Image: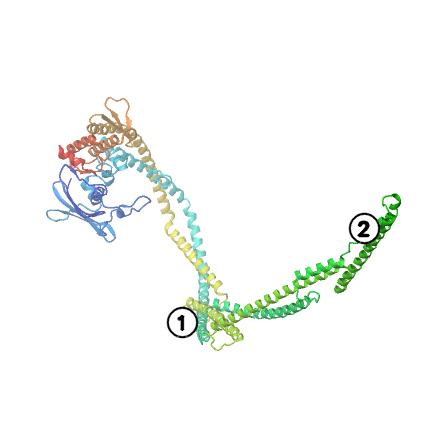
């Protein structure tokens, strides 16, 4: 098969066209440039899109991943050549199903290709189902590794063993095991079923008798219950008629309540806004609080007035108490200085001791002067007399002066004590101290009076401002108010109306809710005139139970009658048992034969495995030697397709995980090419699709791979989608 042209509206491809030629086609495009999209488009055109696939975490289903970015419908055309005929495939939307519409025509004539359908187009043209194509000739981005898909394993095993793609040892083995399981597989096999059928036949006679008895009992119970059911249905209808009537009355009452509530709200609203719309409730409550404060302020003002009068009286009393005739218009300090001076005067004692001492000495000297003439100190006796007279005069004068001084001081002290009306000088200072304290009290009383006056003035101003503000607020909805009593009445009335309005609105809301919850009742059904024996709930419960029991009895009766009809007569039962026994004997013989055949096949399958592996390994080794320039020339694969490579002349094969990324990619590419050669038909080789398969190859590996692919391109068409320009540069530079 050879692809000629592709036209796609698919993912990021918007009415894009790609023409291809025979051999190796290098379609260069950068990352996100549409390489993987063209590969996916080719696969979708051949095999369709799985519409049952769903998005998963970290994965987007193809039907969603490749929706055109432009918003157009997903559609495409694929022109190809197959077995000498040019064929055009078209896929497009069918309803909401992407690529649900399929058409295959001969390109030159436009006639339909009858043997191609949406389901078989890929498998017919490629010669392999989708999973085999994906794991062999279709190497998607990051998909160089081979896995052991059942279909691919079966096809390789069939080719390696028998040379026929449709028949393999594994298929024969599965078919034999399927036949074996069908004969003895738990309870679902033919043999267990036959054994069970024989055991059941022994029970049929007893079941016939039991079924007949149950059928008779069910008939009697049915007749009895049917009568009770009819009576309960009539009672139920009576309940329903009365309930409908009650529902109608509730609906009418709800409508009336709704109308009344609306009228009440409208009336209160009109009354509230008669002279103007009042402030909000919070403002009114605040004004009411201020009004209460105003009343409290009135009390405080009265108390302030009383305190002022008391302060004035206390000031007058303190001023009167601070008046002392002894200290006229004196300050406390001046009065203290005067009292301190007067107390010193009243308490002073004259110092006369010196006068008395000197006077006594003068008299003593006078007596001594009378003796001096006789002692010879004085020359004449008259001198002693003169001296004695002078000294006596001095002594007498001093004694008289001391006495006069003492009398004068005592008179001054007595005068000071008499002025203050006290007996002791200390009492004078006490009088001054009392005056000082009286002056302090008088000053404090004056300050108290000033403070009381200021408090009263502040209360009067606050009273005036509050009254003015309240009147301004109230005049917006009560313009006739003139005093605080009217303010209080207006605020209380507004708050009461607000409260009534809120209550009325709540009532209206409840009435609306109730009215909305009650649908308009339909006309009530006619009352059957039966007086119910039970309340509605019990009537419904009894009717449900009766109907359930009737259903159970009818089911039981039908089952019993059905069983009687199916069991048949004893003669027929005996004939069936005999035939079952014969069938059981035959199936047991077949089972033994199948076991023998399966054992022989297992032995043969081991031989087939020995033949299969070398062929695939040799072919993959040949390709690997070409790709690596002879460095690695041997490949071995396990039954699960785990690949190993061996260096030329090496002793130990190396697993793919132990190789460099480039060498590992070479290994898997070699295996891919070998699998394609073994699995896919050689008569009409399908294209090999390689999406960025050489990304991890260095320039040398790339050159070796391209040489191999060009040689392989002589046998089949190859589509290589690189993300760099080096592949085309290599081809042009050759």
Pick whichever, 467 or 315, lies toward us: 315
Asked which colour scheme the image uses, the reply is rainbow
Q: Name which quarter of the figure residue 645 lies in.
A: top left
**Left or right of residue 519: residue 442:** right
Q: CA distance from mark 1 to mark 2?
A: 151 Å
Task: Specify the farthest residue to the left.
Answer: 108
Structural crowding at the residue carrying mark 2, measured as other residues with C-alpha within 10 Å and reported as few (<14), some (14–19) or many (≥20)? some
Q: Residue furthest front?
A: 380
Q: Is residue 230 left or right of residue 636?
A: right
Identify the residue position indicated by label 2 in the image: 358
Residues 246 and 164: in front is 246
Quick check: can you spot residue 204? Answer: yes
Marked residue nearer the N-terminal end (1 or 2): 2
Secondary structure state at the residue bearing disc 2: helix
Residue 100 versus residue 281: which sits nearer the camera? 281
In the rendered image, which quarter is residue 655 located in? top left
Q: Is residue 527 visible?
A: no
Residue 449: where, in percent of width, then height?
Answer: 61, 67
> How many residues crowd mark 1 within 10 Å: few (<14), some (14–19), many (20+)?
few
Name the residue that disc number 1 marks: 523
Q: Quadrant of the C terminus?
A: top left
Q: Are marks 1 and 2 in contact (CB under 8 Å)?
A: no
**Left or right of 637 in this view: 209:** right
- The location of residue 283, given as percent across then percent down, is 48, 67
Is residue 361 found left or right of 176 in the rendered image? right
Q: Residue 629, image x and y in percent? A: 20, 27
Mark 1 vs mark 2: in front:
2
Please give the name of the residue rendered at 73% of the width and 57% of the height, measured from the top-left corner: 344
Q: Is residue 18 above or below residue 490?
A: above
């Amino acid at each position: 098969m050879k692809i000629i042209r592709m036209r796609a509206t698919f993912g990021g491809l918007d009415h894009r066209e790609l023409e291809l030629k025979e051999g190796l086609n290098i379609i260069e495009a950068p990352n996100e440039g549409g390489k993987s999209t063209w590969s996916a488009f080719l696969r979708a055109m051949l095999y369709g899109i799985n519409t049952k696939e769903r998005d998963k975490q970290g994965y987007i289903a193809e039907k969603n991943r490749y929706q055109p970015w432009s918003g157009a419908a997903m559609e495409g055309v694929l022109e190809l050549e197959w077995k000498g005929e040019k064929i055009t495939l078209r896929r497009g939307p069918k309803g909401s199903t992407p690529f649900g519409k399929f058409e295959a025509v001969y390109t030159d004539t436009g006639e339909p290709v009858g043997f191609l359908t949406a389901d078989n187009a890929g498998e017919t043209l490629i010669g392999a189902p989708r999973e085999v194509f994906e794991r062999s000739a279709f190497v998607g981005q990051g998909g160089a590794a081979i896995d052991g898909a059942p279909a691919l394993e079966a096809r390789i095993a069939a080719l390696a063993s028998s040379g026929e793609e449709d028949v393999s040892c594994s298929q024969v083995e599965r078919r034999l095991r399927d036949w074996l399981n069908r004969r003895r597989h738990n309870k679902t096999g033919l043999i267990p079923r036959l054994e069970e059928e024989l055991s059941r036949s022994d029970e049929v006679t007893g079941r016939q008798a039991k079924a007949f008895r149950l059928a008779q009992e069910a008939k009697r119970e049915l007749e009895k219950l049917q009568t009770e059911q009819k009576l309960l249905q009539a009672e139920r209808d009576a309940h329903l008629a009365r309930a409908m009537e009650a529902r109608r009355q509730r609906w009418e009452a709800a409508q009336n309540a709704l109308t009344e509530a609306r009228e009440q709200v409208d009336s209160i609203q009109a009354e509230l806004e008669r002279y103007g719309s009042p402030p909000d409730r919070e403002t009114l409550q605040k004004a009411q609080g201020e009004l209460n404060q105003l009343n409290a302020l009135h009390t405080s003002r009265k108390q302030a007035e009383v305190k002022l009068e008391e302060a004035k009286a206390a000031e007058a009393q303190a001023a009167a108490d601070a008046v002392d005739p002894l200290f006229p218009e004196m300050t406390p300090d001046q009065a203290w200085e005067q009292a301190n001076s007067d107390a010193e005067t009243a308490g002073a004692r004259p110092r006369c001791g010196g006068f008395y001492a000197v006077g006594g000495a003068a008299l003593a000297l006078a007596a001594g002067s009378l003796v001096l003439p006789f002692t010879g100190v004085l020359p004449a006796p008259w001198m002693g007399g003169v001296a004695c007279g002078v000294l006596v005069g001095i002594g007498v004068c001093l004694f008289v002066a001391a006495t006069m001084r003492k009398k004068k001081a005592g008179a001054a002290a007595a005068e000071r004590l008499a002025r203050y009306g006290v007996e002791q000088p200390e009492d004078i200072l006490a009088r001054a101290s009392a005056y000082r304290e009286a002056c302090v009290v008088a000053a404090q009383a004056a300050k108290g009076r000033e403070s009381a006056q200021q408090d009263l003035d502040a209360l009067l101003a606050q009273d005036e401002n509050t009254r003015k503000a309240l009147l301004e607020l109230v005049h917006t909805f009560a313009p006739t108010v003139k005093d605080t009593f009217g303010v209080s009445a207006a605020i209380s009335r507004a708050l009461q109306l607000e409260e009534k309005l809120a209550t009325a609105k709540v009532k209206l809301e409840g009435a609306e809710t109730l009215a909305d919850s009650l649908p308009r009742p339909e006309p009530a059904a006619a009352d059957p005139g039966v007086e119910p024996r039970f309340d509605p709930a019990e009537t419904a419960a009894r009717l449900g139970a009766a109907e359930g029991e009737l259903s159970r009895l009818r089911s039981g009766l039908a089952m019993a009658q059905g069983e009687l009809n199916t069991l048949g007569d004893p003669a027929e039962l005996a004939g069936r048992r005999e035939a079952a026994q014969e069938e059981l004997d035959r199936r047991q013989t077949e089972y033994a034969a199948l076991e023998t055949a399966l054992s022989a096949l297992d032995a043969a399958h081991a031989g087939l495995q020995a033949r299969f592996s070398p062929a695939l390994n040799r072919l993959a080794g040949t390709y690997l030697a070409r790709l690596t320039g002879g460095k690695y020339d041997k490949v071995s694969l396990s039954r699960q397709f785990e690949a190993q490579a061996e260096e030329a002349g090496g002793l130990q094969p190396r697993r793919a995980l132990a190789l460099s990324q480039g060498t590992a990619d070479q290994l898997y590419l070699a295996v891919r090419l070998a699998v394609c050669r073994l699995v896919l038909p050689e008569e009409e080789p399908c294209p090999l699709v390689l999406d960025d398969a050489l990304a991890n190859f260095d320039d040398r590996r790339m050159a070796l791979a391209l040489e191999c692919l060009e040689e392989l391109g002589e046998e089949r068409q190859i589509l290589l989608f690189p993300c760099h320009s080096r592949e085309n540069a290599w081809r042009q530079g050759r």
